[in-house]
Amino acid sequence: MKASAPPQARRRRGPSLVVLALVVCSLLVPVAFVFFFSAGYGSFADERPQEDFDLHLPHWSNRDKDQDVPHLVHEIKELPVPTIPTIPEVSTQTTKQDDSSAVPKQIIVPPKPLPSPNVTTGNTDGAIRLSEENKQACQIEFGSYCLWSFERLEYMKDAIVKRLKDQLFVARSYFPSIAKIQGKEALARELKQCIQDHEKVLSESIVDGDLPSFIAKKMERMEQTIAQAKASPVDCNNVIRKLSQILGLTEDEAHFHRKQSAFLYHLGVYTMPKSFHCLTMRLTVEYFKSTPSDPDGFYLEKFNMPKYRHYVLFSKHVLAASVTINSTVMSSEVTGNMVFHVVTDKLNYFGMKLWFSRHSFKEAAIHVINYEEVITQSFLKNVPSELFLPEEFRVSIHDPEMPPTKSRMEYISVFSHSHFLLPEIFTSLKKVVLLDDDMVVQHDLSFLWDLDMGEKVNGAVRFCGVKLGHLRKYLGDNIYEAKSCAWMSGLNVIDLEKWREYKVTDKYLQLLEQFQGERPTSLQEAALPLSLLTFHNLVYPLDETLTVSELGYNFEVDTDTISNAAALHYNGLRKPWLDLGITAYRKYWWRFLTREEQYMNDCNLHP
């Protein structure tokens, strides 16, 4: 009989397998990312617009999946950058006054109009005045990227470079007509030489400071040449046609670069920064290399006792979960009765275990749960074991009787598929408080445990900017009250006893089967209508001033409102741990981050 491998050998084999799995995942995710996008799904806006003019919402939205980056990468890679037609050689032969031979034949696709900034004349502060129409049009096509790009728009201060470009466009518009006029061969050659000189200078200079010292002479020479061209007997219609052609190509090129920039913005928003990925891998490797103390053993009796105050987080982000827990604990007067359950996936489970074993949060107990393991061991059948985080949907709502500038852009976060399995994960608990990992708590939440929600199941902040009637196209033929408000996840009080009594999970699974029977739909896509229908008439409205949301996309949230709120919700794409996070709001998140941690220093993670 063959002897089994000694424990030490098995222990060495464990970290090797985990490290190998992490390396394979880090290699496959970008490949899958490219192949997934090459299929051509989606759009550059944060949502895929629907036919309903009242509301635009995404088919899916999971903020922690790399494959959820807005698509059309294939279009970007294949779309050639529009170029100005090359200047033909000057011919001395007599030709007709028709520029069709001078301009290469090509099909000019009418460019998609881009919202161009309205610059106020005489503006001395360099700010750009943007009309609401421009902002609205840009957001519909490119989503929250526009808010980020508008924030960084600056008036072009390099007047000489701008003048060079203007001269170049005028010269290009006159050249085809001048080249066909008999007796103007010298002027055509001079104009061509000036065009080539300007192109060379602009290819090497972006700002006025990069321009060579002799640029004034070249500009004067170009000005004189253009004046001679204007004095020549040319057909103005040909010049106008050429100018229109150049304008169309320029707008096409600007739109192309806007799409490229929007893609890179979304790539930066949806993908995990390298430093955070480094931290996760380091923690996982160190977990198997060392023998971390197991906090579960000391607090094991607390995890399943209803008399304690249980908080639940679904998270794949160790620092985000840590900040949410730390802020909640630091804002509480009594911490000995607090138990935090961090539900994560198997890839992040061991890193989370090591992190929370290295850090203490006053007297609070931390319980890290492997979601896949729990679901696999449950009695549920045909239920995906993949962990889904709270889903976020971007909606654009406007009244048909109002102008488009009155449209509202909002983000709504709701429960994911995994949230509806709470009774299966916490079989012995009666009441829990759900926190998203993009929350920061500023005041004591102990009063939530004294709420009498009556027959309601879900205590949530209502969002009456969206009503169920707005979503009639997505809710199907189910019965609901059209004037009922939507509600937000982020901070929710869940009565698990009432949940089991009303069989909320069964109701959700029945609705999910109905939706998937009517048309194929993903769990992410169906999250918004299913969450609203499942908890219809089961939501207890919390005070709207309890949380301040919009910190992941709205630049105009009042600082006093932020300071007075019990909790801050960074819903939207611009999470506070990202470089693209809104600078004014990031400080509220970073102040609760653990300092002087060895692995954070190794991975260059600093505020």
Image: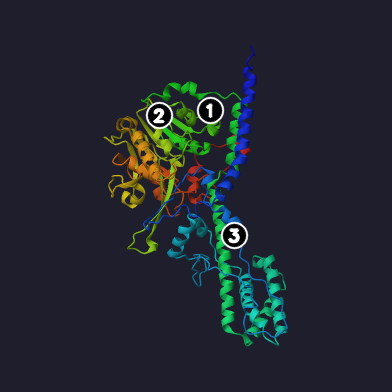
Under mark 3, the amino acid is: Leu
Badge 2: how crowded within 10 Å, few (<14), some, or many (20+)?
Answer: some
The percent position of residue 477, horizontal first and vertical second, equals 31, 47
**Judging from the image, what secondary structure is the residue with disc 3 in?**
loop
Visible in this render: residue 398? yes
* 469 and 295: which is toward the camera: 469
**Disc sitting over residue 79 in the figure:** 3
Image coords of residue 311 (percent x, y): 41, 32
Between 168 and 442, the residue placed more toward the observer is: 168
Check disc 1 and give the amino acid type.
Ser
Residue that carries the numbered disc 2 in the rendered image: 424
At label 2, the amino acid type is: Glu
Q: Nearer the viewer, mark 3 or mark 2?
A: 3
* Foreground pick, 57 / 379: 379
The earlier-in-sequence mark between 2 and 1 is 1
- Cα distance between the residues tagged 3 and 1: 51 Å
What residue is pinned by disc 1?
Answer: 357
Q: Is residue 327 above or below residue 378?
A: below
Separation (CA) of disc 3 from disc 2: 49 Å
Residue displayed at 37% across by 36% down: 509
Residue sitting at x 56%, y 82%: 237
- Which quarter of the figure has residue 494? top left
Q: Tell me the residue at 43%/21% (across/down).
A: 301
